[in-house]
Amino acid sequence: MPKPKYHIVVCTNARPPGHPKPSCGSQGSAQLLMAFNMGLMQRGVMPGEVLVSGSSCLGPCEQGPTVVVYPDGTWYSKVTEADVATILDEHIKGGKPAAKLNPDAVWK
């Protein structure tokens, strides 16, 4: 398999109900993971060209759901299903982080 051009990592960490700290899993990140995969298929991206993976906790739980795009190392915070198309069209297909989504805001 050739080296992928991008790797999209979606935090899907879920904490038990009543836990004092929020989690990306409780904020719909499993649906984001599916939306990224479906969006890539709809755009005709060849399998293996872009990988999409779920992960355990990435750290900034209060800013979740969190998505990171490598090799750029661009972090997106508070990602919604509506943001998936923007990330795929501007970042993955267009080659530049989706500025209107305030990438890397999670660390500012």
Image (cartoon, rainbow, N blue to C red):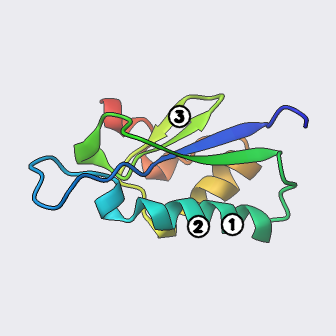
Point out the image quarter for the N terminus: top right
Numbered disc 2: secondary structure: helix
Callouts 3 and 1 close, C-beta under 8 Å: no
Q: Nearer the viewer, mark 3 or mark 1?
A: 1
Residue wearing tag 2: 35
Q: Residue at x 80, y 37 (%)?
A: 4
Residue wearing tag 1: 39
Tell which of 94 and 50 is nearer to you: 50
Q: Amino acid at mark 1?
A: Gly
Residue wearing tag 3: 74
Q: Is residue 30 left or right of residue 51?
A: left
Point out the image quarter for the C terminus: top left
Q: Residue at x 83, y 45 (%)?
A: 49
Dot 3 alpha-carbon crowd within 10 angstroms: few under 14, some 14 to 19, many 20 or more:
some
Q: Amino acid at mark 2?
A: Ala
Q: Amino acid at mark 3?
A: Thr
